[in-house]
Amino acid sequence: MEPQEPHKPQESREPQESRVPGEPQEQRVPREPHGTITVARALGLPALRRGLPEVVAGQELLERPVRWVHAGEVPHIAALLKGGELLLTTGLGVGSRPAEQRAFVRRLAERGIAALVVELGARFRTLPGPVVDTARSCGLPLVQLHREVPFVTVTEEIHTEIVHAHYALLRQADVVHRQATEVLLRGGGVPEILCHFAAFAANPVFLETPDGHLLYAAGPGGTPPAGAADPLQVWEGLRARRAAERPEPPAGSVMADIPGGGPGPGSVRARLTVLPVAGPLGPVHKIAAERTADLLAVVLLRTRQEEELAARGRGDFLTDLAEGRVEPSDAPAQARVLGFRPGADGPLLPVVMRLEEDPRPLAGGGESWAALAHALQEELAAVGVPVLLGVRLPEGRVPLLAGLRGATERGATERGAVAERIAAALRAGVERAWPDRAGARPPVVIAGLAVGWDAAGTELRHAAEAANAARGLTDRDWYDVRSLDVDLLLWRLREHGDLAAFVDRVIGPLLTHDRTARPPLVPTLETYLRHAGRKAETARALHLNRQTLYDRLARISRLLGSDLEDPQTVLALGVALQARRHVR
């Protein structure tokens, strides 16, 4: 089957020895993405390179994956193939008439084979024009071999490469699974696992219920490229696609069911979906998604944390909004994805609850945050306004947005009543979800100003900072953020040495006295200042007779060397008493 030497002299064939695009002479085997072997790689392997392959059609399609290799010489060979094969032939079954040759190539293209490789010599000295033209028109890579090669050697070599590529793919998926398991063992939960998988896939990842409700969205992380879409914006596009009666995800997506442990429809508890937004997805992502789904199934079955997942997803959105990572113009659409639909012209009320102690040791068990999220959702359902509730585990914080009715002026009037109902619901939810916290300090609830979407992020951030500054203030059911402006200013200065020096200079002797003497005098001074220096009201509040109060005030004045009637002294004392909570 070796062609005659005049037809293909050695020196004339060297430039055509392998038509793998962009490969240097010493490295003709390209790397394929996602553990596949492509037509280009097959042509670069030694067995086919010895045949001096020349690509005569489909040069731009050499990155097609090769599923298998088959050799055959019968006219109806297409009927025996499944697609994805690299077909080796000497051309005996191609036919002698142009119509037969065109039909032979067309049927192979319709079958979806990876490429047709024809060895010259036994049947053809050069490939017939109808074969080449049909391959070009059908988009089928067509390769001719100028030298005879043993087809069995080609088959063995390519099949070995396919097995090795598949093994490498499995090893890569194993690495991802092992790393996700390590995330779990380090204390991470479902969100951390999803973020890890999103970073591996370099695409947004979504966890949804079987009926299509979003539980959690994770992006690849890091700084997104210019123009990159937020995961929630991507999800909104997927929802719109489904609403247009196209329930299937975009082509190239990866989906994996998360089993729930039961038979029938209930056997699917959730679904993991990866969309090819930033780049294509391959077989390795499918395998890794299936293994990640198995890991997520174990976590979900153990902790029953779907409610927590949804709340954490909303908490991430509210935090991104507060920290300026979400544009105000994009925020309403992303909030709708999360189920928040306030009135079109009504203002928003930002509210933040902060737990005074780390709740996890008190609540005990992996279901603590899931139980809290569920209880809070149920309690807030009775408030009577739309609420977007989130949780932030790292900070022990619960942020939310409530939709007020009417225009901004009317919403501002409604603000106090709604804030009171929300605060009561939040505290009731904590007590119900975590009965073991009985006796612990109640949470601090801060209500921000009623604003529109353009200022909602700023107010959320302001309320969150005020909640930090208000730690230890538990004498009210909720605090207006404006009443904490001085506390917030002092909290921001807490790391500055001058604040501690100021406290020590103004009330240091009084604090030293109270550490060793009884009765303590700081409560007397605080009550006196709270009642604006009115001694009769101060005595009644402290349950003291007037002479006892006068004696205590005189002792305070002597210890501090200050005149308690002087307005500037009173101002400094009030600020120092507030600041001491932040410099302990």
Image (tube, helix red, strand yellow):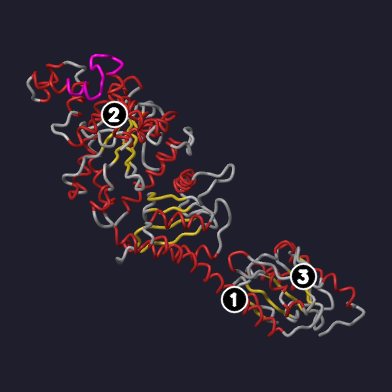
2 vs 3, front mark? 2
Q: In which quarter of the image is residue 262?
A: bottom left
- The percent position of residue 62, horizontal first and vertical second, equals 70, 65
Q: Which of marks 3 and 1 is nearer the N terminus?
A: 3
Q: Say what amino acid the circle numbered 1 marks.
A: His
CA gap between label 3 and label 1 equals 33 Å
Q: Tell me where residue 12 appears, x and y as whole percent.
A: 89, 73
Residue positioned 84% across, 75% down in the render = 126
Q: Identify the residue at horizontal 79%, vertical 71% (top origin).
A: 54
Percent position (x, y) of residue 515?
Answer: 20, 36
Considering the numbered disc 2 on the image, is that residue within a helix, a strand or a loop?
A: helix
- Residue contact between numbered discs 3 and 1, judged by CB atoms under 8 Å: no
Q: Which residue lies furthest to the right in this view?
A: 6
Q: Main secondary structure of the magenta part?
A: helix
Q: Which amino acid does label 2 sit on?
A: Gln
Nearest the camera: 431 or 564?
Answer: 564
Mark 3, secondary structure of its residue: helix
Disc 1 packing (10 Å; few <14; some 14–19; many ≥20): some
Residue under label 3, please give it.
131
Label 1 and label 2: CA atoms lie apart by 69 Å
The tag earlier along the polypeptide, 1 or 2, is 1
Dot 3 amino acid type = Val
Residue at 13% across, 21% down:
551
Q: Measured along the vertical axis of the image, is residue 495 above or below residue 186?
A: above
Of the two numbered discs 2 and 3 on the same chain, state the one appearing first in sequence: 3
- Give the magenta-colored segment's residue range: 554-569
3D distance between C-alphas at marks 2 and 3: 89 Å
- The tag on residue 164 is 1
Instruction: Classify residue 401 by image quadrant.
Output: top left
203 on left or right of 76: left
**Residue 560 is one of the magenta-drawn residues:** yes
Residue ID for mark 2: 578
